[in-house]
Amino acid sequence: MKNISYGSLKLVEDCPTCFWYHIKHQIKRTVPWRSNLPNAIEENILQNVFMKHREKGTLPDELNISELKGYKLIDKETHKRWKSPFIGELKFRNLIALPDDVLTNKKKLLVIDIKTIGKKPVNCTRESMLKSIEKYSYKLQLEFYNYVLRKIGYKTEDFGYILFYYFDDLDENKKSKLQFERFKIDLSVGNVEQLLEKAGKILEKNIPPKERCEFCSSHKERYEDEITKQKKQQEVIDEILKEMDDKKNLMER
């Protein structure tokens, strides 16, 4: 079965039909275009900052708080392996976790998730960010990582942190500073277990669930196109094999 990440498991909550097509037939949702700026911020700015602290054994300012005394970022090589989807080191059965970062105090691990939103939206407050955490299941994301880490033998805290990064308005020199908001999130792996149970029941069926969402309209058509394509490919292969058999029979005569 295809590996299940947080993103695919989240579909169980969003739309069981999208989840069924995604896992059963590798037909993904068609989602609107999104800016690459948030990814660029994380990859080009934040990772460099975190890496410097990783090498020094210190915490960046946004995590340098009394509650995290004694913690440090996991080492460079471990972080590289745990972040790589090609290595997939944090894997339990077909569940694969790719956390943004992890802290350790040599006894337990603590998961960190990073969200970048480019320029801070108008009227964006801590309260609205908390609503986003709930709306987009960011809490579930941390819980999924915690679940996988525990299943493969690590001890983890019952809480994690989400860091929201954004640029503030331009100053008089037309420069903008990168700001952050930090949120401590209480976690329960029970939520993940419930979703996995539901996911298992969905995948037992040979037909998609009845639920539909705005993204479902193209699934059936794309699935039928894929089946047609596979049949044509098989017909070509069968024809080639038949020709090879015919030539072999002629030679044996």
Image: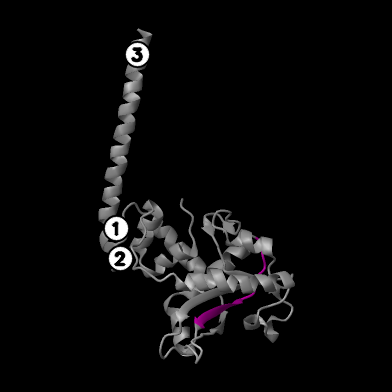
Tell me the CA gap for discs 1 and 3.
45 Å
Name the disc covering residue 249, or none.
Answer: 3
Location of residue 155 (image quadrant): bottom right
10 Å crowding of disc 3: few (<14), some (14-19), many (20+): few
Query: Going by the picture, which residue comes out furthest to the top?
Result: 253
The structure residue drawn at horizontal position 61% and vertical position 64%, both measured from the top left corner, is: 149
Boundaries of the magenta span: 153-166
Label 1 amino acid?
Answer: His
Badge 3 marks a residue whose secondary structure is helix
Location of residue 14 (image quadrant): bottom left
* Nearer to me, 29 or 23: 29
Along the horizontal axis of the image, is 47 left or right of 55? left
Of the 4 image quadrants, the one containing the C terminus is top left
Residue 16 lies, in percent from the top left, at 36, 64
| Residue contact at pointers 1 and 2, CB within 8 angstroms | yes
Q: Look at the picture and state if 252 lies above or below 162.
A: above
The structure residue drawn at horizontal position 66% and vertical position 64%, both measured from the top left corner, is: 154
Residue 1 lies, in percent from the top left, at 46, 50
Name the disc covering residue 215, or none.
Answer: 2
10 Å crowding of disc 2: few (<14), some (14-19), many (20+): some
Task: Name the N-terminal-most of marks 2 and 3.
Answer: 2
Query: Going by the picture, which residue comes out furthest to the front?
Result: 173
Residue 41 lies, in percent from the top left, at 52, 73
Name the disc covering residue 219, or none.
Answer: 1
